[in-house]
Image (cartoon, rainbow, N blue to C red):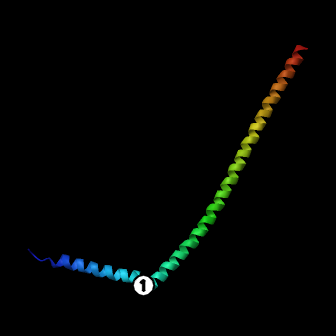
Amino acid sequence: MAFNCGKLCTFAAGVLFGTAGIKVLSSRDAKKVYTHATAATLRAKDCVMKTVNTVKENCDDIYAEAKQINADREADEAAKIIADVVNDEKEAVTAEV
């Protein structure tokens, strides 16, 4: 059985870098960086949520106005139909006389 130093050295280097990485990531300075990054993320979230709420309010206004426009058009069309029926009846009465 041959001894392979390359694989053993690679494994040892991985363990060494992994251990060093854990120590670096759990240091006070790293925690301070994480805290500031999290605070910045929360500020960004608040900004995005304000924008989302503004867009939602604008969409709600547009939807309400569109519904009103359609209701007005339906009322105008109904009034025209009624006016046409009344005119037709007047013409029929006038023609009979």
Residue 28 percent location from the top left of the image: 45, 85
Instruction: State how many labels appear.
Output: 1
Q: Which residue sits at x=72%, y=42%?
A: 70
- Where residue 32 sits: x, y (%)? 49, 83
* Residue in view at x 88 percent, y 18 percent: 93
Question: Which kind of residue does numbered mark 1 sit on?
Answer: Ser
Quarter of the figure with the N terminus: bottom left
Residue 74 locus on image (x, y percent): 74, 37
Q: Residue most toward the top?
A: 96
Tell me if 94 is positioned left or right of 2 in this view: right
Residue 79 picture location, percent across and down:
80, 33
Q: Quadrant of the C terminus?
A: top right
Q: What residue would you read off at disc 1?
A: 27
Q: Is residue 45 above or below residue 65?
A: below
Q: Quadrant of residue 14?
A: bottom left
- The quarter holding residue 7 reads bottom left
Toward the right, the furthest residue is 97
Q: Residue at x 75, y 39 (%)?
A: 73
